[in-house]
Image (cartoon, rainbow, N blue to C red):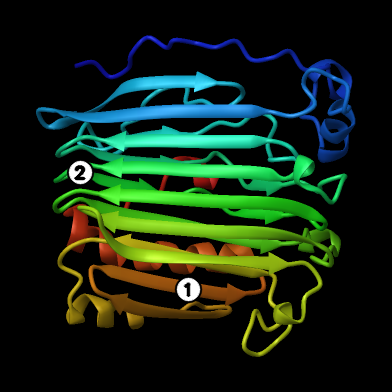
Amino acid sequence: MSETCRDPVTPIRPQPALGGGGARPAGPAEIAAARRPHAPSATWDARLELGFAADGARTALIHRRHEGPLRVQKALYPEGPAVCHALVLHPPAGIAGGDALRLQVRVGEGAHALVTTPGAGKWYRSRQPDDAQLARQTLDFDIAPGGILEWLPQEAIVFDRVRGRAHSQVRLAGDAVFMGLDLLCLGRTASGERFTAGSLAIASTITRDGRLLWHEQGCIEGGARLLDSPVGLRGQPVTGTLLVAAEGIDTALLEACRAVQPLVGEGGVTRLPGLLVARYLGPAAEPARAWFVALWSVLRPALAGRAAAVPRIWHT
């Protein structure tokens, strides 16, 4: 097996030139302007398939196929050959109304993959309050016995008046390990924007050998009372969840995680059969990410046998 494979590439639809001939990245307003309802590129239907396999002591990216503007350029090995890092790139930089993004990852027996993103994701405002302008993201992960998948994207910014739906499905076999992070910033708080209207529906499911470990679904409504309620988000714009499915999550590991407290905001850690759940609520993404990294630094050596190695792209 080799580090990479030849892509059966599907050409990306041409997009109107934005931002003065490409001298600078297009902003959200420019991208939205290019998405005219009658234009061929009004919406994106993008799909990326990744397959990882163990080749001796090495994890190789053996399958890579993309349709539309969603892809991985190359396999990276900042930790050495045992762990393959992959950066998922989405050149439009966010999901707009009518877009549908699907990421499929297959991790073979004994392989170890870490998948992340080069920057914050974005859920853009939908121009029409109907299902035709619904933005969709689907994550579909399969992990074979002895395999490890770490899905550690950077935060996603949810714009005001978004209409989105995010669904994730994780299927584990045998003693496979999954660590997955979901970090949301409601509104562009740096510019004073609040999440006053729109909605983001979220659903996630984890199974092991066909047995249900986790199923959660809900909907965050812009402007709803739950955003400020003491039994809801308490007026905080950032919320996040770390889900860890693995054997060996014992009381000692749970207590070690509970001993790690966020410097800003609130965090809590719960153990369910075969699962650890960590939740964060606070004012900004940076302290949230720092807390989740601290938890990951406790969990990874115990469950994956390796010290945590923060992806380099997070520092750029």
Residue at image x 39%, y 21%? 64
Instruction: Identify residue type, mark 1.
Output: Arg
For label 1, count other residues whose C-alpha is less than 10 Å away and answer few (under 14), some (14-19) or many (20+): some
Return the residue nearer the eye: 94 or 138.
138
From this view, report whether residue 124 is shown above or below residue 80: below
Q: Where the N terminus falls, by quadrant?
A: top left
Secondary structure at badge 2 equals loop
Q: Which residue is mark 2?
A: 147
Residue at image x 73%, y 37%? 98
Secondary structure at badge 1 equals strand
Residue 279 - label: 1
Answer left or right for 233 relative to 274. Answer: right
Residue at image x 69%, y 28%? 44
Q: Residue furthest bottom?
A: 230
Measuring from the top left, give residue 81's x and y in whole percent. Answer: 21, 31
Answer left or right for 117 relative to 294. Answer: right
Label 2–label 1 contact, CB within 8 A = no
Answer left or right for 302 relative to 64. Answer: left
Q: Where the C terminus falls, by quadrant?
A: top right
